[in-house]
Amino acid sequence: MLTNPSTKYHPFQPVQLSDRTWPSKTITHPPTWLSTDLRDGNQALIEPMNRRRKLQMFELLVAIGFKEIEVAFPAASQTDFDFVRDLIEGNTGDAQASQRIPDDVTIQVLTQAREHLIRRTFESLKGAKRAIVHVYNATSPVFRRVVFNQDRTGTVQMAVKAAELIQSLAAEQPETEWRFQYSPETFTATELDFAKDICDAVLDVWQPTPDRKAIINLPATVEVSTPNGFADQVEWMHRHMKHRENTVLSVHTHNDRGSAIAAAELAQLAGADRVEGCLFGNGERTGNVDIVTLALNLYTQGVHPGLDFSSINDVARAVEDCTQLPIHPRHPYVGDLVFTAFSGSHQDAIKKGFAAHDPNGRWNIPYLPIDPADVGRSYESVIRVNSQSGKGGMAFLLERDYGLALPRRMQIEFSQVVQQVMDERGTEMTAPQLWELFHQEYLYSALPFRYSSHHLTESGKIQEDQQITATIQFNDQEFSIAGCGNGPIDAFLDALDLNMRVHHYEERSLSHGSDAAAIAFIELSGDFIPTSVFGAGIHENIVKASLLAILSAVNRAVHQLDEATRHTLLKRFEHMLIA
């Protein structure tokens, strides 16, 4: 049972920022992206990445377009240390090793604000062309009191000493282009005035310039508020922090409350220049912010994110291999099912959206906020049919994959057939299975009537234009029938003499060229059936396709009758043929 939370938990204290500006702003350009997949993401894995997977992940991040990549916590383990050395020295056993870090990519490493760890970190970076040293110490009251037994002054001194040591060690390696980053860990639970004081003290040591900006990273180490609360904290720091014009303001949001993406987006409105995160939100506890979702959110608003996710499936499979973690099938933009509609009403809307879409216009398809093709996904899985589906989904798949555009009333009729099969199977139905079911229902004409041959002649009568002589099979016996009409369809119905009338007729081509197959759809009603019924026929000759469609409809009508009515009708037809 849940206890009384008001007596157990500390509610978030809102920032007093009555003139906040972020609510009226819009994101118009992407932030600077920092991937921490190889550090924060890696330390969150049950089985941390080995050397092969680390290199695979690094190369993937470079290919996507990240220009800043946090590659390790080199003082934490020999594995991390060696990986940094591999990247810098090229001890990888291949001819391209020296080019492992492209000229336009800066690696970043993390260290705690402790002297021996900082020194070890600089050892790992010897010979690097460019590097960011990211130092942190926790600043919130509970960490100061419980973890470090430090007051505010002692906590600031810890950060300042680390900043001074970093500056000194960097001066000893002038061949590297250095940048420095400081994070007041647990920022979201830290008093804002103290967060400002400690960041200002570090910046006073580093003295950033327009050409060599420092980075102040504000981490939601543990997410403790709604996204607007975090945005207020960021805007307050953005307004009050020293050296702001020479500082890159960065955020690193976690997902403890499930709001990391919203928090990162609002933080950008509030003044953040840079976002740290992981692909697909990997990271400690509930994860870091998901950079893929953030980037593609921008893309759907007409802002190019500066990252390339045009082959999102390849990215997903590579990340799954590196992390040994599955990606949820409903994960935004990348999940196997996110572009898939099972609901009948959704499918109908999507089908109509594609039909009305202007390929040269703006993307505006119901239920699809992004064009799947832009992220390398095909339209194959946009609509899938199961027991929740309706006529729209079934019709969409048949038209897309087989060029079979069903008349609307026939869509309704066939969807009932599909629904019955779905209810029986309890599984989804693929396009090939739908095509086979369509054949079984309409084209593989069941007894009693089957087509054998026909011959058309001009009748010579005034009111009728054509006469037909046809051979049909009735209960596996061949009979000849003859009739007249103002066309082959009318003549054939006259020959059958079943008092059936045409309500609707369409003919279409299923393919292109001189040998294109034609499909005929016909809707018939008759004295012996309570409602109309559809039939279909496919053949290179459209007249034969039409006759096949008539027999398809007649057979389907007969099979829908109750046993007594069906017996009476067939006996009547049999007597007619014998006579």
Image (cartoon, rainbow, N blue to C red):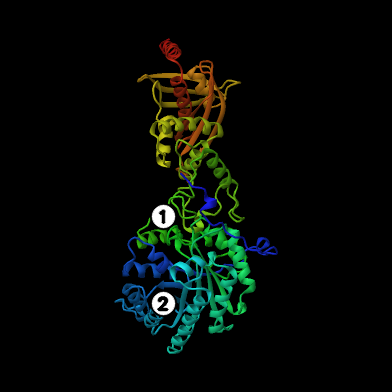
For the residue pair 302 and 521, the one nearer the viewer reads as 302
Instruction: Look at label 1 and name its amino acid.
Output: Ile
Quarter where residue 551 is shown: top left
Q: Is residue 186 above or below residue 98?
A: above
Disc nearest the viewer among 1 and 2: 1
Instruction: Give left or right: position of 574 versus 263.
Output: left
For the residue pair 255 and 579, the one nearer the viewer reads as 255
Q: Earlier in the sequence, mark 1 or mark 2?
A: 2
Quarter where residue 475 is shown: top left
Element type at mark 2: loop
Place of residue 88 in the rendered image (x, y in percent of width and height, measured from the top left):
37, 80
Quarter where residue 84 is shown: bottom left
Tag of residue 577: none
Q: Is residue 179 above or below residue 337?
A: below
Instruction: Look at label 2 and name its amino acid.
Output: Ile
Asked if the residue at tag 2 contacts the one at tag 1, i.e. Cβ–Cβ closer than 8 Å, the answer is: no
**Which residue bears the numbered disc 1?**
327
Place of residue 523 in the rendered image (x, y in percent of width and height, measured from the top left):
53, 27
- 10 Å crowding of disc 1: few (<14), some (14-19), many (20+): some
For the residue pair 43 and 423, the one nearer the viewer reads as 43
Place of residue 527 in the rendered image (x, y in percent of width and height, measured from the top left):
53, 15
Q: Is residue 301 visible?
A: no
